[in-house]
Image (cartoon, rainbow, N blue to C red):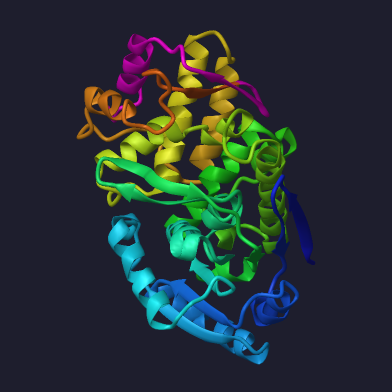
Amino acid sequence: MSSVIHVALPHTNYDIVISPNCLEDLGNHLLSLRLGQKILIVSNPEIFNYYGETVINSLNKAGFEVFSHLIPPGETHKTLNSISQVYDIALEHRLERSSTLLALGGGVIGDMTGFAAATWLRGINFVQVPTSLLAMVDASIGGKTGVNHPRGKNLIGAFYQPRLVFIDPMVLTTLPTREWRAGMAEVIKYGIIWDQDLFEQLEAEKNLDSLDNLNLEIAQKIITKSCQAKVDVVSQDEKEAGIRAILNYGHTIGHAVESLTGYSQINHGEAVAIGMVAAGKIAVKLGMWEENKTQRQNNIIEQAALPLTIDNSLKSQEIIQSLQLDKKVKAGKVRFILPTDIGQVEISDNVPSEIITTVLEEIHTK
């Protein structure tokens, strides 16, 4: 069971291929793109240990000259220093404008590889082969690339679209359970902001906390619907001038929580889950959303074994101060994405600070 989603943007087009056991066919797919001969794979040691050989063999059989560079896992390595190391390897192997950087890994690897591709020789080919649920449904699609600044997430980056996104759902069988749950946060997000049918499908699945508890066919449907939701939004607004901002649902407070914990204690999906809980509560207090709907959202978050509360070690005032550093701040006002119905949200920069403070206090661990 395979599916292809076509992404049509003003200046470029590419496909998202979703197919079980497709890694061995990656080389043939890249041949059709008429890329240059040299491909540099960027990955992390664990993912490369699982899938590096399969990907390299596939590319070699297709006639590509393949190199690799490994970056340790985690947000703490999503830095300009890591990008500089990729540049060093690119220079060592004389990568040209026709060459390709291939991201084999999760969202961190994809973001960094894309940024390196966008900036090496002012832009070379870039291919995404995501290996985590979060990367499959979110980070690999839409062209956002970048690295973190010590005081804020993804403050350094560029919009740069891949030539291909190649998704093999079977690689999720080696994904740690915590990372599966992190990806489910983004899936839940799409249900709230865009796709009521997806939300109701998640509601009907009582075991979202592990791939072991979910039929692989159902998992592929969830991935496909999530990818399609993101494509629908990005196709209307490639560089976040308007509607694309709704993809940041749960991310405003989520990014603040991530940065304040040093990108190490709480992963991205866990932070987004907390942010969605907060956004739902804010929307209820503003009279935009009904209490029973925020409870339905929170029930799914709980089904995915994601957090609903903030640890008391994080003070509300620190979170509010961190919000001002978010790249979504406009004219000094923090933009929130707030739900109005299942499948519908609005963008608001008019949330009173006292409501933010109240909600943060309510979702702190008691």
Q: Quadrant of residue 197?
A: top right
Residue 172 placement (x, y as % from top left): 56, 66
Percent position of residue 50, x then y: 48, 79
* Residue in front for this viewpoint, 187 or 11: 11
- Vertical relation: 340 (above or below) 24: above
- Where does the image place residue 3, in percent across and percent down from the top left? 78, 61
Left or right: where 227 falls relative to 332: right
Position of residue 143 measured from the top left corner of the image (x, y, whole percent): 57, 51
Whether residue 345 is in magenta: the answer is yes
Q: Is residue 14 left or right of residue 243?
A: right
Q: Is residue 113 visible?
A: no
Left or right: 315 as drawn, with respect to 330: left
Q: How many marks?
A: 0
Q: Quadrant of residue 75?
A: bottom left
Magenta range: 340-366
Q: Report the residue at 47% width, 10% height from top.
A: 285
Task: Assess whether residue 115 is covered by the magenta stretch.
Answer: no
Quarter placement of the C terminus: top left
Q: Residue at x 65, y 66 (%)?
A: 166
Residue 360 lies, with reference to residue 230, above or below; the image says: above
- In the rendered image, the quadrant that contains the N terminus is bottom right
- 239 versus 180 height, above or below: above
The residue located at (63%, 57%) in the rendering is 214
Visible residue check, residue 94: yes
Instruction: Reply above or below: 86 against 293.
Output: below
Q: Is residue 303 left or right of residue 219?
A: left
Q: Nearer the viewer, residue 273 or 325?
A: 325
